[in-house]
Image (cartoon, rainbow, N blue to C red):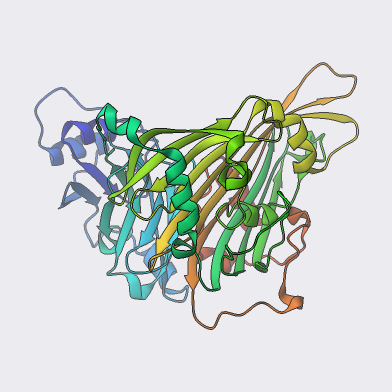
Amino acid sequence: MLRYLSERYDCMFIYDSRTIENNSQAEIKQGSYSLQEAIHQVTGNKQLILDAVGRYVSIRLPAKERTVAIEEKQESRDSCFQIKGHLRDKETNEAIAYCSVSVENSSINTVTNHEGDFTISLHDSLRHSTIHFSHIGYLSLNITIADLLGQYAILALEPKIVVLPEVYIQAVNTKNILQKYFINRSENYLKKSIYMNVFYREGIEQEKGSTELTEAVFKVYKSPCDFTADNSSRFDFITTDMVKLEKMRSMVSGTEHKFLDFKIKSGVQTFFQLDVVKYAPDFLDPRYYDNYYYTHTGTSFVDEQRLYVISFQPKPGAREALYKGHLYIDAESYALVMVRFEVVPKQLKEVTKILVQKNSKSVNLSLKGVVYTVLFKEFGGIYYLNYARADLNFSSRKKMSFSNRNIHSWIEMVCTDIATTDVKPFERRERHPVRSIFSETRHSYDISFWDKYTIIAPEERFLRLIHSLEVEE
């Protein structure tokens, strides 16, 4: 009903989820109403107050009736507070996933989850700052933090429609764009070492079986990009980047139905490998451009920057070419802003051997698809790895059985903050081994730590699992 009113009155609502219960049924009698009257009819609460904030309408209780429990709780957490909400497409009402949610004039950042939800934790000193929402293909949105405090914000981004003449599309030389991207890397990407605060999550969901979820916070030493090195071997992966584990927690449900002991290779190592600018896969390496077809398939925007959209796929006969996907390259700086790519079907069998580290001998495992999403974000004129996600879908079958089960495994990580001063490599004893199976790492759990740290908001189906761990503690 609130979504209907949002469309009818051309506005978006901001409200505390304890003030309005989203799952409650509502009805309104036919008639003519002001927006305030309509809200009172729908909610059954005539005490609600409406405040206009541009095109957004804040719905709240009178100050004397409004609960202050959350504010008191926030003040006790070292003067930290949280902003939570949901982001959707203004025209389709569909959730917007992987949208950047950042604080202007700072490096603090997160992204929306697959369902469009976001959570960002901030220090009290930022109460008067502005939250910036940006996503490829949409107009950006800025809202002051003060207007979001104590609310669960339902926000919408407006798609940015690009109409370009057909002759312009045809005139773009994709090889020229890729060459300029390659040449400009030393200007666009890391020139000195930085520290990155990283939130990390990995999970495995088995159909009619168990769900495993592991979350962690890392401090990452990110060394500068060395684009002068000439690696003779195509897939050599030698990194000088380092990880220090700050906190982690693991959760499992449905173990009574578990039948498959299954682990993918370390997602921590994958985090480094998905820095596709620093550790280029073949489709971004000029030595292997001839293995792919590159096509300019459109133009998009992010934060008013025009982007070339270039699609790529293997040429017939290119046996070692593994991927197909889309590159988003800035039209002025030629920086790679985003890449989405997947393993082509004919290579899935070979890739299974690379990705799976541990599997039950009594089960046949078949990889059905692998999709990667990588985002880079500009800060101080330099781009850095901001978000990376890998989704792997398998089909499993017990030997001597005719029924299959689907398995979804994934990893995702977001850089929540960066530091550029007094950066030096971690001592050996501080470093976490990146090649180990991370979910099997032993580490103490601290519930208070998670309350004040910026994360990727968990999707709805995992909230109960996380809550059960907190109750046990």
Left or right: 364 as drawn, with respect to 270:
right
- Residue 241 visible in image: yes
Left or right: 47 as drawn, with respect to 176:
left
Which residue is depicted at the point 84% across and 39% down? 359
Residue 295 in the image, given as x and y percentages of width and height: 45, 32
Residue 76 in the image, given as x and y percentages of width and height: 45, 74
Q: Nearer the viewer, residue 372 or 212?
A: 372
Most distant residue in the bottom direction:
422
In the picture, residue 74 is in which quadrant?
bottom left
Vertically, is 305 above or below 380? above
In the picture, residue 256 is in which quadrant?
top right
Q: Nearer the viewer, residue 194 or 154?
A: 194
Which residue is depicted at the point 71% across and 31% down? 319
Vertically, is 192 above or below 303? below
Left or right: 86 as drawn, with respect to 270:
left
Query: How many numbered markers are drawn?
Result: 0
Vertically, is 123 above or below 37? below
User: Which quadrant would the N terminus be assigned to in this image?
Assistant: top left
Q: Nearer the viewer, residue 43 or 376?
A: 376
Most distant residue in the top direction:
402
Q: Nearer the viewer, residue 92 or 178?
A: 178
Which residue is depicted at the point 60% across and 56% down? 200
Residue 455 in the image, given as x and y percentages of width and height: 51, 58
Vertically, is 418 above or below 310? below
Residue 119 in the image, given as x and y percentages of width and height: 44, 55
- Residue 208 visible in image: no
Which residue is depicted at the point 49% across and 76% down? 420
